């Protein structure tokens, strides 16, 4: 089904005002189908969520008020209660505005998760610690890479897994100031240089580890290689055995930096239903359908604030923390987020998980607006 794009030919002030008007719903919600993938399903009304508000959100996507949304899923009280897909363009790094092939997204379509992948890597670190393969987050990063000992120094030797998990390693890194289309971007350099691990470990320390937060996908890629050194399994194989198989996730695709190194910081592909499983795993304290996959202690440590983000929230172990405000109500959340509008948002007090996928790689990204204006009021 093709979605029409509304062309707003009005002054900027009026264009902004349009977003304050509820879209006319022409959509009636129904319970998602059961597919045998592990999800119990129910209707919105069965769990006390307003169908009208959710249908308004869908109408705003259909009429083009909110563009480049590819899916919205809602899990309430352990049940998948809403699932809607929208046509759009798959991600293509080399495409115009990063657009690839036009796609009719549906329940079986995997989607590029971008940096949502980082939260999966954090879970894998926790599983490795649970298994005793890694002693804990205080282990020094360089201890796992003796072949690069010549790159170590007194400052770098202080960098622990904790600092990589919280993006407070202090290593010099430029991933925020340059676009991903610029080969000078340090993350993009990993795909160019002959030895990505050496590239990351050779970076100088520019701030004391643990004192300053800076977005650093290089550290996440080191975490992936640390799991490999500790377990003897490349992280895609480790994930399949200890995370995906227990969750019943069978349809996935990893990205690779080179022929033997997984891109741990981004571009894992999953179905949105399986993204929702991961969110619910953390909402449910590490248990999926009665089976413990990751320890409750790791879930708690991962999803509490370890680094301040200058008034915009906090950062955990590759998870983000934020308080959403809808009307007079404030609701705490932790979430995994990725470029383009990929999101797994967990609201513990509401027993709620919300998943988005999208293609807003340039321009406005409306996920939070949809959450605040429609989803939270519908639940509350």
Image (tube, helix red, strand yellow):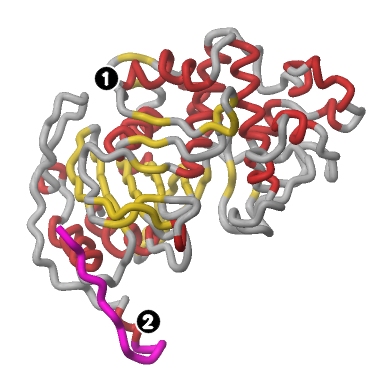
**Residue at (33% x, 90% y) in the render:** 10
> Viewer-proximal residue, 57 or 217?
217
| Residue at the outermost bottom position | 11
In the image, the segment drawn in magenta is 1-14
Question: Taking 248 as reference, is 258 left or right?
Answer: right
**Residue at (60% x, 9% y) in the render:** 133
Secondary structure beneath label 2: helix
Question: Taking 24 as reference, is 285 left or right?
Answer: right
Residue 294 place in picture, x, y as percent? 45, 19
Q: CA distance from mark 2 to mark 1?
A: 44 Å
Residue 320 place in picture, x, y as percent? 52, 45
Which class describes the residues within 10 Å of circle 1: few (<14), some (14-19), or many (20+)? few
Q: Is residue 166 above or below residue 183?
A: above
Residue 195: mark in rendering: none
Prevailing secondary structure of the magenta residues:
loop
**Residue at (76% x, 35% y) in the render:** 199
Could you say which quadrant of the image residue 163 lies in?
A: top right
Question: Taking 8 as reference, is 154 left or right?
Answer: right
Residue 289: mark in rendering: 1
Could you say which quadrant of the image residue 223 lies in?
A: top right
Residue 131 place in picture, x, y as percent? 53, 9
Residue at mark 2? 16
């Amino acid at each position: 089904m093709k979605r029409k794009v509304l062309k707003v030919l009005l002054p900027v002030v009026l264009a902004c005002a349009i977003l304050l008007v509820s879209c006319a719903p022409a959509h009636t919600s129904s319970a998602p189908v059961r597919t045998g993938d592990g999800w119990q399903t129910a209707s919105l009304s069965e769990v006390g969520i307003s169908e009208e508000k959710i249908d308004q959100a869908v109408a705003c996507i259909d009429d083009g008020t909110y563009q480049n949304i590819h899916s919205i899923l809602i899990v309430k009280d352990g049940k998948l209660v809403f699932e809607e897909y929208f046509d759009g363009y798959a991600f293509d790094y080399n495409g115009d505005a990063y657009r690839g092939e036009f796609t009719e997204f549906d329940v079986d379509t995997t989607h590029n998760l971008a940096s949502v992948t980082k939260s999966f890597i954090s879970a894998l670190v926790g599983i490795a610690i649970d298994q005793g393969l890694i002693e804990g987050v205080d282990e020094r990063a360089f201890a796992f890479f003796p072949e690069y000992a010549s790159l170590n120094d007194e400052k770098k030797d202080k960098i622990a897994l904790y600092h990589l998990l919280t993006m407070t390693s202090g290593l010099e890194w430029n991933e925020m100031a340059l676009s991903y289309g610029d080969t000078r971007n340090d993350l993009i350099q990993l795909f160019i240089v002959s030895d990505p691990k050496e590239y990351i470990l050779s970076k100088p320390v520019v701030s004391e580890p643990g004192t300053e937060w800076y977005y650093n996908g290089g550290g996440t890629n080191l975490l992936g290689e640390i799991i490999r050194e500790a377990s003897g399994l490349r992280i895609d194989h480790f994930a399949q055995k200890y995370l995906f198989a227990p969750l019943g996730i069978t349809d996935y695709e990893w990205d690779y930096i080179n022929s033997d190194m997984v891109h741990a910081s981004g571009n894992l592909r999953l179905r949105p239903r399986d993204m929702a499983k991961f969110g619910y795993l953390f909402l449910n304290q590490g248990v999926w359908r009665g089976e413990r996959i990751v320890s409750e202690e790791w879930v708690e440590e991962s999803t509490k604030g370890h680094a301040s983000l200058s008034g915009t929230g906090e950062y955990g172990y590759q998870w983000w923390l934020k308080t959403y405000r809808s009307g007079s109500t404030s609701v705490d959340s932790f979430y995994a987020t990725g470029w383009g509008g990929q999101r797994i948002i967990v609201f513990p007090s509401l027993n709620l998980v919300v998943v988005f996928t999208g293609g807003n790689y340039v321009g406005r990204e409306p996920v939070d607006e949809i959450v605040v204006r429609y989803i939270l009021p519908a639940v509350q």
